[in-house]
Image: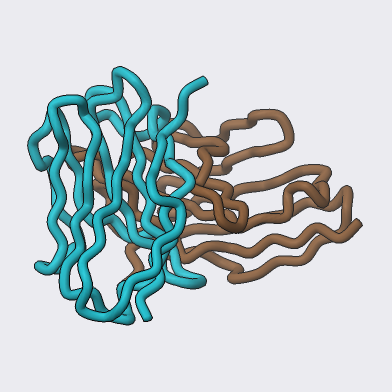
Chain colours: A brown, B cyan
């Protein structure tokens, strides 16, 4: 059972468009929500992260929106570029754990030139 | 900047053989995490070590074992390999067991069991 549900599985956007990836969780003990970008054959790289006491965080073209009551969070990529084409994983870390990541199932993003 | 180093990058083993994967964390990082990523799958947590002691255990088969050494590098030992063990194995390191922002992944070891 996937503890962090991610959608869509794949996403195709035009260059300059907005890419939106959504995640939902059930466990209210999660207290940290990072997003990772992964290119083929490479390890996941931290993109941006948010804690549940913040509703939005923006870093450059990347924005996380967090809805604590709905237990949902999303990644928005503004002005999407072909170089953004990669697999994106949302993740969560459980409060009081050894800080291991629980990943969503991933979204394959393709940005068309 | 120094990153997490994993070796080997690629490994091909036959069924029932043994494999050892190595991970060298970022200097001064005392926590190591191991993840397994099957084809088209999300990474699954296997095991973690903090200050050379096992800190948590995930979906790691009994055929696998791991340890963290005095220099903080870690090794994942896999015995009686099965075809289903073919995957990318990632190591990540962080400081003070904090994970989160301090999490850095290596480039992984691709294990193919034939």
Percent position (x, y) of residue B21? 29, 52
User: Considering depth in this image, is B48 or B76 the residue closer to the camera?
Assistant: B76
| Residue sticking out furthest to the right | A113
**Left or right for A95, reference B62:** right
- State which quarter of the image contains the N terminus of chain A: bottom left
Q: Quadrant of the C terminus of chain A?
A: bottom right
Task: Give the residue at x 22% y 40%.
Answer: B74
- Which residue is located at x 37 percent, y 81 percent? B114
Indicate whether A75 appears above or below A12.
Answer: above
The residue lying toward the viewer, choosing from B87 and A47, is: B87
The quarter of the displayed image where residue B106 is located? top left
The residue sitting at 83% across, 43% down in the picture is A79
Residue B78, image x and y in percent? Answer: 20, 63
Q: Is residue B88 left or right of residue B73?
A: right
Q: How many discs mark residues in the rendered view?
A: 0
Q: Nearer the viewer, residue A65 or B11?
A: B11
In the rendered image, the vertical position of residue B78 relative to residue A76, given as above or below: below
- Residue A48: image quadrant is top right
Query: Residue drawn at (75%, 62%), measured in percent from left and top?
Result: A110
- Foreground pick, B19 / A39: B19
> How far from the left and from the top, in percent, is residue B29?
29, 24
Q: Position of residue A54 (x, y in %)?
A: 47, 31
Image: A67 above or below B19: above
């Amino acid at each position: 059972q996937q503890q962090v549900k991610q959608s869509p599985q794949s996403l195709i956007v035009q260059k300059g468009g907005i890419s939106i990836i959504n995640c939902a969780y059930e466990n209210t003990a999660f207290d940290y929500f990072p997003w990772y970008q992964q290119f083929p054959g490479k390890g996941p790289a931290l993109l941006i992260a948010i804690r549940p006491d913040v509703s939005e965080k923006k870093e450059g073209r990347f924005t996380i929106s967090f809805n604590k009551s709905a237990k949902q969070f999303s990644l928005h990529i503004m002005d999407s570029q072909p170089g953004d084409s990669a697999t994106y994983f949302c993740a969560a870390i459980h409060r009081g754990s050894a800080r291991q990541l629980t990943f969503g199932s991933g979204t394959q993003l393709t940005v068309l030139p | 900047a120094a990153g997490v180093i994993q070796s080997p990058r690629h490994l091909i083993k036959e069924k029932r053989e043994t494999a050892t994967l190595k991970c060298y964390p970022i200097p001064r990082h005392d926590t190591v995490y191991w993840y397994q990523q099957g084809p088209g799958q999300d990474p699954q947590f296997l095991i973690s070590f903090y200050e050379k002691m096992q800190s948590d255990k995930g979906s790691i088969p009994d055929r696998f074992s791991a340890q963290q050494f005095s220099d903080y590098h870690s090794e994942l030992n896999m015995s009686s390999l099965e075809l289903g063990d073919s995957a990318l194995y990632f190591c990540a390191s962080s400081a003070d067991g904090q994970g989160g922002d301090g999490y850095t992944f290596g480039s992984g070891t691709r294990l193919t069991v034939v």
